[in-house]
Every structure is written in C-alpha cells, then in structure tokens.
C-alpha cells in the first residue's frame, strides 16, 4: 500500500480530530456516581490487603521474639552457655565433691560474680551448673552464699531434707546431720525454704534467721540487725558471732510440761497461765518481742519474775536478749534457776547467762564461768558443743592460744564430726 501524499495525510488527520471533538461529551451525574462507587470498592480492597499484611508481619515478628527468648541468646535453636567457675582452696572430684586442700575452706567463684564459701571441715558437692545458676549440696557443715542478683537467676541449695531457693541474696547456712539441726541467717534479699516445716515452705526476708530442730520438730524464726558473717578470721579460725537475735536452742521456746509448783495452782489460775504462756511463745516465734516486754512491764517486772511460769520466764529472757536489754534478760534467767532449779530450762539458763555476760564490757571472765558450770552439769547437753566453741573463741580473742588449744582438743574429743570441728582443727594446725 503506497503512502498518502502529505497534503492528503493532513486532511485525514484533521477529519479524525474533528470526529473526536464532535463525539466527546462531559460525563453525566449517574456516570460520575457509578465511577465513584467503583473507585471506593477498589480502595477498600487495597486497605484490607494492607491491614492483613501488617497483622501478618506483626505476628511473625512476635513469633520470632518469643522463639528467641525460648532458644536463648546465642543463636536460633541453641541454649545459652552454662556459667563458668573457679575452685579455690580445694578441687572438684568425681560426682561434684569438693575436697579441701588448705585451712580456709573451699570457695566456688562463678563467672557472673556469685561466690560460695564452704567453711573448714564442711562437706559439699556441686551438683549442676547451667546458664541461670547452679545446684549445690551441703552434706555437713556450713557455707556462706553471695548470689549476684540477676533476672532469671535460679540457684538451689540442698541441706539434708531442706531445699533453699535463691535468686539474688546473701546468707549463711548450716546443717548438722548428727543432731538434725538446720540454720539459715539471711543478710540480704529473699529466699524460700522447703523441708520438714509447718506448711511445707517458708519465705524469709533480710534480717531473719531460721532455726529448725528436726528431731524435736521445733521451728523458730527470729529477726536481727543485719551484719556481715563471718565477722572475723583469726589464726585460721572462722568465727561466726551470733547476731543480736540469735537463738542457741530452738527448744527454748517449745511447750513443756508444767513445773511441780505450777501444778499446785488452782485450775482457773493454771488455765490463765497456760493461755499467757502459749501467747508469749507464739509472739516470741513471730518476732513480737516488744509485746512480751510490754506485757511484763504492765504487770510489773518484779511481780512477773516472781509469779511467771517457767515457759514465760524463758520467753521473757529471750525477748529481752533480742532487744539488747541485758539486765532484764539476766534477771529472768536467774529467776528461772532460782524458782525451777531442777528443770531443763534452768540448765539452759546457765548457758544463756554466759551469752548475756559475753556481750557485756569485761564480761568474758563471768561468761567462761557460766560455760564451765554448764559443761560440768551437762557434758552432753544441748549447748555443750556451743559452750566449748564460745570458750575457744573467748580465749583466742584474748590472746591465750594455749587455753584455746586445750578447748579445741576437748571439742574434737567430744564432737569429732561437729559443726566447728574444722575450725578447731585449723586452730590446732591440723587438716
């Protein structure tokens, strides 16, 4: 087909443009409304699509975040590495046993700052270590824990039938399998303790001390001003001074049978005394010492000392000791010995008088005399081991190593596997 000449081509284009202009017209109202409806429908579908896309993306991001928390911080599908640790003063044997090689106990120093110090002569095991903490068993003796606070930390300490659950705290703990006595002194933080306890579990806060005598089924919680333990280290002997609220024997507040002269009282008087004794024992166990002292003050101190039951005198003496009212504590303990001389509590009062005197200026000589009397009267008594330890500590602190060594040998002769056997051997230079 041959192309058109230029003049004819221009004429054709002009005719075509004229046709377009003649056929074009503005849209009607109905056509505009229909077009707007179609436009809105298309925009709505696009909006729904965008919303679905956003929600899908958000869900995917949430899934990845949760999965990341689950599998750890070191890679998809991999757990965080376990804590590393160093053993000082000993070595780790098979099955996690910690063997002491020096005279200062064994220390476990973990990579995130936690420290566990086993006292000389104590037996312990490192059972398990992971990214969140460790599981340690104290089979005999005592240890100090300084657990670094950390979100998600999980530390467990096993002592005989007891389990201590820890996150971030500092505490001293001890277990004597021979006497079945458990002790925990909490300096900082909170812990939960499970075992043969009333209710099965106890929560402790800073400043509280838990003492449990499994054999006698005695559980006692006291409070004190927090202070660092151990206090001193002298000549290889680690001395754990009793805090202000220390209870040397949980049985001191346990219910006991009435003394002979109490049974002679009228039934109504006995019932009233029993109610008061029970109330004071409960208040003592719950740390309401001021209430006991207030009751005694309202009734009159002299009248209370002359008429209180043996159990009431024991509770009053303990409350006074915990509140550092040494004079009242001494009077209550002396009243116990004077009024109930053949009772078990009178014997306990002999030892406790030594503890009261030991805390007084220039009172160590009187304290040793009370400890000697207790040991003479009860060589295998509940406080016999502690009386020897207190004497050993006093002589060591007064620069009398010869006397301290004599007491240390006596302690090892009587209690070769006792809680302070390691300290006694260290004082004597033995392993």
Image (cartoon, helix red, strand yellow):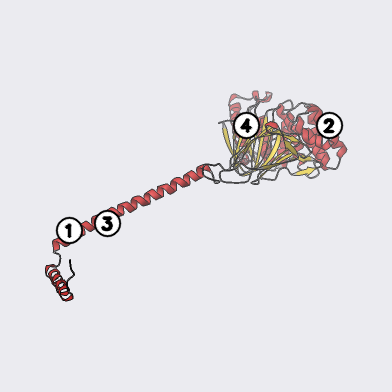
Position of 12 with respect to 249 (left or right) is left
Name the residue tied to disc 2.
Answer: 409
Q: Say which of marks 3 and 2 sits in front.
A: 3
Residue 136 vs residue 309, the one in the foreground: 136
Q: Say which of marks 1 and 4 sits in front.
A: 1
Quarter location, residue 279: top right
Label 2 sits on a secondary structure element that is helix
Name the residue tied to disc 3.
Answer: 43
Tell me the distance, in whole angstroms, between the alpha carbons under discs 4 and 2: 31 Å
Q: Residues within 10 Å of mark 3 (few under 14, many from 20)?
A: few
Q: Say which of marks 2 and 1 sits in front.
A: 1
Tell me the distance, in whole angstroms, between the alpha carbons under discs 2 and 1: 109 Å
Tell me the distance, in whole angstroms, between the alpha carbons under discs 3 and 1: 15 Å
Name the residue tied to disc 4.
Answer: 162
Quarter location, residue 252: top right
Position of 176 with respect to 374 (left or right) is left
Q: Which mark is residue 34?
A: 1
In the image, residue 344 lies at what x, y percent?
71, 27
In the image, residue 147 lies at what x, y percent?
64, 43
In the image, residue 312 lies at what x, y percent?
65, 32
């Amino acid at each position: 087909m041959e192309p058109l000449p230029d003049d004819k081509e221009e004429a054709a284009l002009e005719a075509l443009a004229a046709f377009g202009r003649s056929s074009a017209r503005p849209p009607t109202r109905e056509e505009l409304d229909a077009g707007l409806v179609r436009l809105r429908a298309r925009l709505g579908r696009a909006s729904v699509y965008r919303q679905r896309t956003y929600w899908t993306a958000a869900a995917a991001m949430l899934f990845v975040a949760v999965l990341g928390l689950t599998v750890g911080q070191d890679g998809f599908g991999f757990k965080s590495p376990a804590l590393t640790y160093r053993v000082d003063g000993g070595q780790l044997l098979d099955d996690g046993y910690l063997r002491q090689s020096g005279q200062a106990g064994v220390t476990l120093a973990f990579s995130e700052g936690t420290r566990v110090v086993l006292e000389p002569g104590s037996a312990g095991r490192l059972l398990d270590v992971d990214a969140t903490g460790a599981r340690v068993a104290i089979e005999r003796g005592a240890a100090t824990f300084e657990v670094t606070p950390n979100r998600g930390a999980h530390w467990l300490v096993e002592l005989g039938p007891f389990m201590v659950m820890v996150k971030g705290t500092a505490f001293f703990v001890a277990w004597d399998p021979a006497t079945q006595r458990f002790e925990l002194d909490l300096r900082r933080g909170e812990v939960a303790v499970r075992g043969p306890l009333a209710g099965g579990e106890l929560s402790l806060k800073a400043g509280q001390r838990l003492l449990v005598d499994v054999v006698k089924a005695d559980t006692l919680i006291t409070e004190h001003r927090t202070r660092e333990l151990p206090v001193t280290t002298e000549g290889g002997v680690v001395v754990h001074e009793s805090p202000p609220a220390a209870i040397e024997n949980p049985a001191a507040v346990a219910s006991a049978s009435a003394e002979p002269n109490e049974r002679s009282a009228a039934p109504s008087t006995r019932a009233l005394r029993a109610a008061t004794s029970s109330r004071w024992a409960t208040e003592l166990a719950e740390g309401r010492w001021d209430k006991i002292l207030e009751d005694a003050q309202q009734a009159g101190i002299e009248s209370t000392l002359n008429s209180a039951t043996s159990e009431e005198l024991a509770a009053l003496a303990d409350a006074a000791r915990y509140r550092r009212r040494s004079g009242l504590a001494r009077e209550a303990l002396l009243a116990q010995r004077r009024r109930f001389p053949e009772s078990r509590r009178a014997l306990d009062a002999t030892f406790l008088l030594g503890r009261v005197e030991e805390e007084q200026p220039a009172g160590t000589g009187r304290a040793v005399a009370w400890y000697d009397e207790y040991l003479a009267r009860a060589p295998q008594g509940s406080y016999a081991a502690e009386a020897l330890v207190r004497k050993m500590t006093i002589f060591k602190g007064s620069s009398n190593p010869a006397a301290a060594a004599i007491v240390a040998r006596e302690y090892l002769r009587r209690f070769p596997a006792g809680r302070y056997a390691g300290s006694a051997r260290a004082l004597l230079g033995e392993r």
